[in-house]
Amino acid sequence: MTTSTTTLVDDYLACWNETDPSARRERMAALFTPDATYVDPLAVAEGLDQLDATIGAVQRQFAGMVFTPHGDADAHHDQVRFGWGLGPAGAEPLVLGFDVVVTAADGRIEQVLGFLDRVPS
Amino acid sequence: MTTSTTTLVDDYLACWNETDPSARRERMAALFTPDATYVDPLAVAEGLDQLDATIGAVQRQFAGMVFTPHGDADAHHDQVRFGWGLGPAGAEPLVLGFDVVVTAADGRIEQVLGFLDRVPS
C-alpha cells in the first residue's frame, strides 16, 4: 500500500463523511480505482458513480451523523479489515459496521466487502 | 449462493481438514472456481494448485489438528464472513482466524480474504 493503514481507513471514512458533492467526488477519485466495487448488506455499487450515489443516500438517511473508526485496523498484503461506527458526533454509535477493503497495485481501493454488526432496531 | 452458508463454511473447513490428497482435490474442485484466489497473512495462492499446496503445508505444520467453525457465519449477497479455530480435536484452538469468502455466480468460492485473530506465541 502506498499509504499507511490508518491513513487509508481515515481517508475512507472521510469520503463517507464528506457531504459536499464535489469535494467528496475529489476524495473518492484519489482513494478508489474508477471501477471499484462495493457490497454491503443493503447496497451494491460498481464504479464511482454508483458508490457516490450510495454514500449520498446513506448521508441523507443518517443526516448529521458521522462515521468514526471503531477498534483497530488490521492489514496485510493488499487487504485491510477495520470496524467503524455511525452516530451523532461524540456519542455511542447507532450503527456498527465492519469492512474489508482490497487495494490495487497503485494503493487505491478496488473492492469493499462490507458487513453490519449493529443496526438500529 | 447455491448452498447454505453453514454448508459452505463446513465444506470449506472440510477441505482444510482433508489430508488425503486426491479426496482433498475432489472437494476443492467442487467448492472453488479453478482460478480462485486466497490471501491470508502468511500465504498467497492463485488457483487450485497453489491453494492445494498452501493447505498441504498448513496440515504438515499443524499435523493432527483440526479446523472447526468459531462463532456464527454472516452472509449476504455473494459474500460470507466467519471465524474458525485450529487445534487438537475437542480442545481450545491454538489458532483463531477469520475469513471473508466471495462466491461466483455458480456458488463456488472465487476469493478468500483471510485474517488471523490468535496465533501461537
Image (spheres, coloured by chain):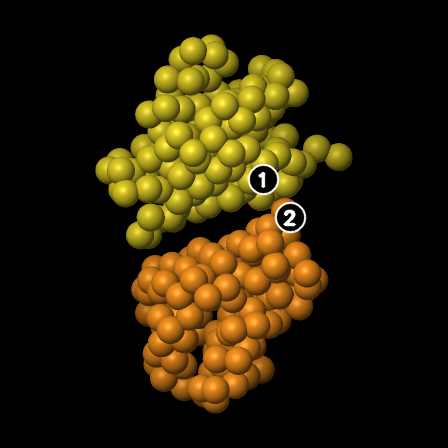
Chain colours: A yellow, B orange
- Quadrant position of residue B95: bottom left
Q: Nearer the viewer, residue A96 or A22?
A: A22
The amino acid marked with disc number 2 is: His
Identify the secondary structure beneath mark 1: strand
Q: What quarter of the picture does the N terminus of chain A occupy?
A: top left
Which residue is drawn at the image coordinates 39% and 30% (left, top)?
A34
Residue at 37%, 24% in the rendered image: A29
Say whether residue A115 is visible. yes
x, y percent for residue B118 = 42, 64
Q: Are marks 2 and 1 in contact (CB under 8 Å)?
A: yes
Compared with A114, A90 (above or below) is above
Residue sitting at 48 percent across and 38 percent down? A37
Give whichever of B40, A10 is nearer the camera.
B40
Which quadrant would the C terminus of chain A be assigned to in this image? top right
Answer with left or right where residue A88 lies relative to residue B42.
right
Q: Tell me residue B81's x, y (percent).
A: 56, 55
The tag on residue A40 is: 1
Instruction: Specify whether residue B81 is in view.
Output: no
Residue denoted by label 2: B76
